[in-house]
């Protein structure tokens, strides 16, 4: 075997190894994105599961915010029904988030409700789910960043193109999620005493 | 946390009697030490002026040993009083619910359970154990000195083998454990690392060799001081909320020390490196305000972790009254 053949052989082995390494790197990063995404779904499910209990607990105390509770029940029903497009799903999620925040804010006006151990437990559980959801979203964003960096950087982008690894989108915070809860909107629903 | 003004008032008023009693004990000990030192040296000198034989040499050595033995015994009594009354008193001033055991320390099993240090110590000791509950948060901490040894065997020209031991520090400082305010099942480790650029990049790249995943957090200032490792990307971020990350960075900047942090079994472990000591003074007076202030600041630095890291915020399911 002459030197040229040896060099050629070494180059082929090196190239094959590089392709395997880059492919595996992309797979690992894509799996991380999927794991983060499935965590978000799991947390959302946990949140949906808490809603019926929350409504049941607050309904007996909140006399003037029935429309808020009805809206939440309807939106939750839509969410768990499935068959939703990504955009619809996102829209429903942000609606639920907004309604939950409003219910918790309005609960401040009901001392008996605030003192109820059942409500306190639900509030703590909801806070936990929200924190876990936020963590899962941050993990998703970080995973997407790492994945997109790999997909777009040379020479991994060649492997990405060959094996159909496409760039992914980040979460965009909905405009209404950014807004501060306006409790007054709900107070206006209450008749004057 | 109490203010310096409150501490000054405490030293001047409530604590002045304790300080006076301890100052008297220190003076008595120092007089005892000097008197017996002079007596021992005089006795040894007289003996050695006589016949310089083996019996006299043995007698001199015995006198010196007896002196050291009794001086140390007396010092130990003084040390116990100093620690119980002065250190214990300052701890009670900071938080009355805390209890103090001068000669106990965090057991080695808990130290290893933190997963901060992956070397099993060959020598493990400690002191100044504090435990109790601050608000809703159970805490315990103590001074820890953990070392490992490397044995080197050498053969000399005559063919004799000699084994030499070299001791290296794993950790020296305060080791703090607190009940964390969230439930979690995975692990997170914040490893102090101030390296930059390519070196840090390499460290992160090869972290998989240790079985940890690097958690790239959003806080760039945090990334200057630490590398965050975890077993689960999502749960690591649940533990390390942006608020906690900021608080850790602020605490690190405030005290400017090497601070290790880990989270495991719903507990938070903090290691603060440094040569801290609570030995009683012999030559310097007990009422030395600068020294008292240093003790207060050192203890406050550790006890304040609960407030600094906001551990009493129990808005999640891990609450003192109930658990979901």
Image (cartoon, rainbow, N blue to C red):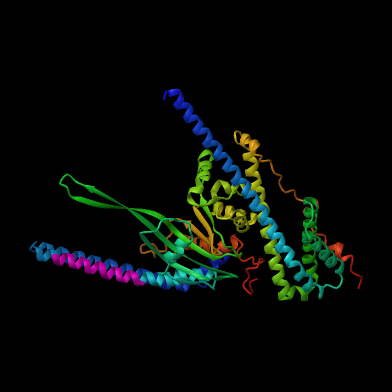
Looking at the rendering, in which quadrant would you find the C terminus of chain B? bottom right
- A161 over A109 or under it: above or below: above
Q: Residue at x 69, y 62 (%)?
A: A129
Quick one: A107 or A43, which is closer to the camera? A43
State the image coordinates of residue B65 (x, y, percent, origin top left): 22, 67
Stretch in magenta: B58-77
- Residue B10 visible within the image: yes
State the image coordinates of residue B202 (x, y, percent, origin top left): 51, 41
Q: Is residue B57 left or right of residue B267?
A: left
Dominant SS of magenta comes to helix
Q: Is residue A82 left or right of residue A125?
A: right
- Disc tally is 0
State the image coordinates of residue A108 (x, y, percent, origin top left): 78, 69
- Residue B289 visible within the image: no
Looking at the rendering, in which quadrant would you find the N terminus of chain B? bottom right
- B160 over B39 or under it: above or below: above
Res A3 quadrant in image: top left
Q: Is residue B136 left or right of residue B131?
A: right
State the image coordinates of residue B281 (x, y, percent, origin top left): 38, 64
Res B101 quadrant in image: bottom left
Q: Is residue B121 magenta?
A: no
Q: Residue at x 57, y 43 (%)?
A: A24
Q: Is residue B59 magenta?
A: yes
């Amino acid at each position: 075997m002459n030197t040229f053949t040896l060099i050629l052989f070494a180059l082929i082995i090196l190239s094959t190894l590089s392709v395997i390494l880059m492919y595996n790197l992309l797979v690992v990063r894509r799996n991380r994105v999927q794991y983060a995404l499935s965590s978000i779904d799991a947390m959302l499910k946990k949140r949906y599961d808490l809603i019926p209990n929350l409504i049941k607990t607050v309904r007996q105390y909140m006399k003037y915010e029935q429309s808020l509770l009805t809206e939440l029940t309807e939106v939750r029903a839509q969410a768990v029904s499935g068959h939703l497009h990504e955009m619809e799903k996102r829209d429903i999620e942000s609606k639920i988030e907004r309604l939950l925040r409003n219910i918790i804010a309005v609960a401040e006006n009901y001392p008996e409700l605030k003192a109820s151990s059942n409500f306190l437990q639900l509030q703590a559980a909801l806070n936990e789910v929200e924190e876990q959801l936020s963590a899962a979203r941050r993990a998703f964003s970080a995973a997407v960043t790492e994945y997109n960096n790999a997909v777009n950087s040379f020479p991994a982008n060649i492997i990405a193109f060959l094996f159909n690894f496409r760039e992914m989108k980040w979460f965009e915070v909905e405009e209404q999620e950014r807004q501060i809860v306006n409790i007054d909107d709900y107070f206006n629903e209450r008749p004057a005493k | 946390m109490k203010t310096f003004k409150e501490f000054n008032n405490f030293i001047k008023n409530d604590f002045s009697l304790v300080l006076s009693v301890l100052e008297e004990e220190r003076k008595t000990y120092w007089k005892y030490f000097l008197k017996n030192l002079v007596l021992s040296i005089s006795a040894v000198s007289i003996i050695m002026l006589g016949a310089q034989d083996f019996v006299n040499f043995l007698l001199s050595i015995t006198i010196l040993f007896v002196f050291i033995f009794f001086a140390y015994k007396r010092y130990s009594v003084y040390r116990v009083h100093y620690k119980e009354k002065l250190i214990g008193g300052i701890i009670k001033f900071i938080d009355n619910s805390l209890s103090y055991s001068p000669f106990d320390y965090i057991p080695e099993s808990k130290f290893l359970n933190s997963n901060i240090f992956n070397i099993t110590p060959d020598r493990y000791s400690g002191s100044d154990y504090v435990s109790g509950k601050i608000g809703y948060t159970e805490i315990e901490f103590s001074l820890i000195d953990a070392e490992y040894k490397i044995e080197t065997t050498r053969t000399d020209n005559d063919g004799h083998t000699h084994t030499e031991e070299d001791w290296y520090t794993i950790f020296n400082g305060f080791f703090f454990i607190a009940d964390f305010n969230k439930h979690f099942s995975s692990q997170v480790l914040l490893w102090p690392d101030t390296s930059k650029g390519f070196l840090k990049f390499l460290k992160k790249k090869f972290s998989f060799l240790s079985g940890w995943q690097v958690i790239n957090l959003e806080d760039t200032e945090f990334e200057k001081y630490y590398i965050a490792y975890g077993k689960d990307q999502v749960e690591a971020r649940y533990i390390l909320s942006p608020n906690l990350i900021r608080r850790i960075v602020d605490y690190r900047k405030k005290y400017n020390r090497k601070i290790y942090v880990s989270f495991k079994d719903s507990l938070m472990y903090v290691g603060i490196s440094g040569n801290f000591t609570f030995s009683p003074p012999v030559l310097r007076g007990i009422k030395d305000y600068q020294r008292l202030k240093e003790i207060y600041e050192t203890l406050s630095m550790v006890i304040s972790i609960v407030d600094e890291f906001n551990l009493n915020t129990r808005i999640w399911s891990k609450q003192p009254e109930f658990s979901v």
